[in-house]
Image (tube, rainbow, N blue to C red):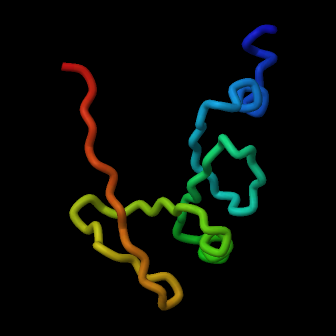
Amino acid sequence: MSATNLGAKNIINMFPSAQFYDYTALPERVVPPNYHLTFSMKENNLRDVRTAIKSKMNIAVVFPLREIPRAYNIDGVEYQVIMPRRQTRGH
């Protein structure tokens, strides 16, 4: 099988014990159990954000570097902002 014939779904199904991660702007996507999606919040998709919250999806929000809040309010509900730890690779 050539690499050009391999689609993302095929690769995910070929390796069911591997965990795949991705971002999406589509909150109602149906994916295999080994494919984790994080919803991407944008300036104009609050309706989709609400759907993603109801689906218990993780949500990624971009903030200016020096203005990262400790919490973020959506529709009167305060959500904790979790910052990933910085990781360095190599020596």
Left or right of 91: which side holds 58? right
Residue in front for this viewpoint, 41 or 12: 12
**Quadrant (top left, top right, bottom left, bottom right) of the N terminus:** top right
Left or right of 43: which side holds 85? left
In the rendered image of this protein, does residue 51 appear above or below residue 3?
A: below
**Residue at image point 60% right, 75% down:** 46
**Residue at image point 21% right, 63% down:** 66
In the rendered image of this protein, does residue 14 appear above or below residue 74?
A: above
Q: Residue furthest front?
A: 17
The number of discs equals: 0
Q: Residue furthest bottom?
A: 76
**Quadrant (top left, top right, bottom left, bottom right) of the C terminus:** top left
Q: Quadrant of residue 19?
A: top right
Residue 18: % across, % down: 61, 31
Q: Quadrant of residue 65?
A: bottom left
In the rendered image of this protein, does residue 77 appear above or below residue 23?
A: below
**Residue at image point 69% right, 26% down:** 15
Q: Residue furthest top?
A: 1
**Residue at image point 76% right, 30% down:** 13
Residue 43: % across, % down: 52, 69
Residue in front for this viewpoint, 53 or 48: 53
Residue 40: % across, % down: 55, 58
